[in-house]
Image (cartoon, rainbow, N blue to C red):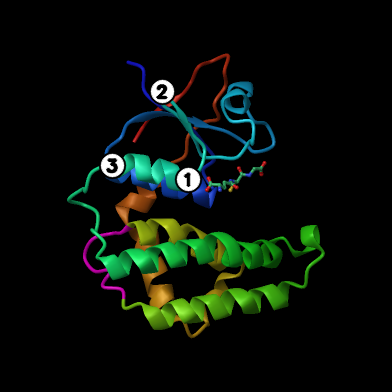
């Protein structure tokens, strides 16, 4: 059976959200786990920009996580929250905020020496964004209620990275709703399944994994 091929890196937040969308939509693929420092030739042939995730379909290649999510979610699924118009606007705004500003500060907070940055300055910027998010949401247990939404899967992997940088600091902050939402997410089967470990793809072994 020729499945779509997904090049993925377990810890990449963009790849995480793509994997979660594929799980929710029950779209099977052959997952090829890679290391960013050793990208397979085939991946670079089909997507020279060299970022993960990359999904190779019979007729096209998707190499942006949000495009993979849109492809997976072609029809409404009964296990995923359907956005109202205002929720959709909030989703678009927040995904943009987290993919740009939050990611910018997160990288400089986490990898301050690589960027020659002052980590506390960027930690503070992340904090402000998370406090603003906290004021906008009332998770129960997900942002929009009982069903997980594309907003949850799109931004929580980045918020989790902020926590991992310094869990003690993160958990001592005042954005309690965000902290609770992240705790719920980290214990949910969707996340656990998306974070399953796979051995590295080796073109000589052709050891791709059927996913999910
Ligand atoms: N806009 C892209 C960003 C993907 C991205 O930047 N992924 C990182 C890993 S988290 C990557 O592959 N970086 C390339 C590298 O580090 O060589 C998407 O949403 O898919």
Residue 195 appears in the picture as rendered = no
Instruction: Determine the main secondary structure of the stretch shown in magenta.
Output: loop
Gap between marks 2 and 1 measured at Cα: 17 Å
Q: How many marks?
A: 3
Gap between marks 3 and 1 measured at Cα: 15 Å
Q: Earlier in the sequence, mark 2 or mark 1?
A: 2
User: Along the line of sight, which residue is nearer the eye, 59 or 28?
Assistant: 59
Which residue in the protein does label 2 denote? 59
Residue 142 place in picture, x, y as percent = 30, 67
Q: Nearer the viewer, mark 2 or mark 1?
A: 2
Q: Nearer the viewer, mark 3 or mark 1?
A: 3
Which residue in the protein does label 1 denote? 65
Mark 1 CB lies closer than 8 A to ligand 1:
yes
Of helix, strand and loop, which one carries label 3?
A: loop
Q: Quadrant of the N terminus?
A: top left
Residue 86 appears in the picture as rendered = yes
Which residue in the protein does label 3 denote? 74
Identify the residue shown where x is 55% and y is 48%: 12
Identify the residue shown where x is 31% and y is 68%: 87
Gap between marks 3 and 2 measured at Cα: 16 Å
| Label 2 crowd bin: few (<14), some (14–19), many (20+), radius 10 Å | few
| Label 3 crowd bin: few (<14), some (14–19), many (20+), radius 10 Å | few
Identify the residue shown where x is 52% and y is 37%: 63
Residue 166 place in picture, x, y as percent = 60, 70
Magenta residue span = 139-149
Q: Which quadrant holds residue 209?
A: top left
In the image, residue 130 above or below residue 164 = below
Q: Earlier in the sequence, mark 3 or mark 2?
A: 2
Of helix, strand and loop, which one carries label 2?
A: loop
């Amino acid at each position: 059976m020729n499945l779509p091929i997904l090049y993925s890196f377990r810890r990449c937040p963009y790849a995480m959200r793509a994997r979660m969308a594929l799980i929710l939509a029950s779209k099977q693929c052959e997952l090829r786990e890679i290391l960013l420092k050793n990208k397979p030739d085939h991946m670079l042939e089909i997507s020279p920009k060299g970022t993960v995730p990359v999904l190779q379909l019979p007729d096209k290649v998707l190499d942006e996580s949000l495009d993979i999510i849109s492809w997976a979610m072609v029809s409404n699924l009964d296990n995923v929250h359907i956005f109202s118009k205002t929720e959709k606007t909030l989703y678009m705004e927040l995904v943009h905020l987290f993919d740009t500003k939050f990611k910018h500060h997160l990288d400089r907070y986490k990898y301050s020496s690589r960027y020659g940055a002052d980590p506390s300055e960027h930690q503070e910027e992340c904090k402000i964004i998370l406090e603003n998010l906290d004021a906008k949401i009332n998770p129960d247990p997900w942002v929009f209620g009982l069903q997980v939404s594309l907003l949850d899967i799109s931004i929580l992997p980045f918020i989790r990275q902020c926590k991992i940088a310094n869990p003690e600091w993160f958990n001592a902050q005042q954005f309690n709703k965000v902290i609770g939402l992240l705790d719920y997410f980290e214990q949910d089967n969707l996340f656990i399944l998306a974070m399953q470990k796979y051995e590295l793809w080796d073109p000589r072994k052709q050891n791709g994994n059927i996913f999910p």
